[in-house]
Amino acid sequence: LIPVIFVTGHSGVKNEIRALEAGAVDFITKPLNPPVVSARVKTHLTLKRQSDILRAQANLDGLTGIHNRRYFDLRLADEVNRIQRYGGYIACLFIDIDHFKNINDTWGHPIGDVVLKAVAERIKNMLRLTDTLARYGGEEFVVLLEQADAAQAFVVAERIREAVRQPAIPLDNGALIPITVS
């Protein structure tokens, strides 16, 4: 949303309340005081930027940088509504890293985090810009494929499975961790 500041010659509480109820973020009466107007504009632009950043962060997984389950749930609802209205296809891929607990138990949680980031990146690289990738929970990912039928979803799933499998994930110490997904 774009912040709107009412600048008017009309004063009074009723006019100010009407403007604010209509969606204004501020109300300035004439005659204008340019430094005050400038300060208020700067303040509202700062608030807008901060709000946008918070909104974006609320939809991202802090570890992998991809969307989170909350965002996925919203996108799925939107996409289902679109299909109900206009028709078409939608496919979902639920992806789980095989034996992830063993990775954490053997190598530790920091290495598990490295694996999660690498898997997220490999999946993301296999998708179209219109597809939605999200971390669903723990070691689970979900992909929403717009306008994809079952056969197309199978092809994408196989591409993802192979991309995650090869090559093994290298660690700083030279070790390689083989990863598979189901």
Image (cartoon, rainbow, N blue to C red):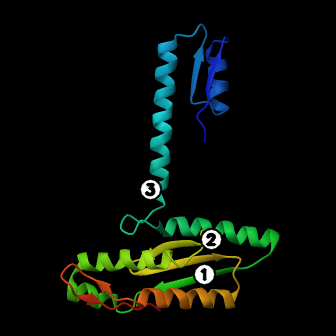
Comes first in the chain, label 3 or label 2: 3
Residue 172 picture location, percent across and down: 21, 78
Residue 178 picture location, percent across and down: 33, 92
Question: What amino acid is labelled 3 in the image?
Answer: Gln
Q: Is residue 124 above or below residue 102?
A: above
Q: Give neighbour class at mark 3: few <14, some 14-19, many 20+ (Cα, 10 Å).
A: some
Residue at image point 63% right, 23% down: 6
- Asked if marks 3 and 2 touch (Cβ < 8 Å), the reply is no
Which circle marks residue 57 in the picture?
Answer: 3
Q: Is residue 28 above or below residue 25?
A: above
Q: Residue furthest top?
A: 31
> Which residue is labeled 2 in the image?
76
What is the quadrant of residue 63 in the picture? bottom left
Question: What amino acid is labelled 1 in the image?
Answer: Cys
> Which residue is labeled 1 in the image?
92
In three-dimensional space, the C-alpha distance between marks 3 and 2, rounded to whole angstroms, equals 19 Å
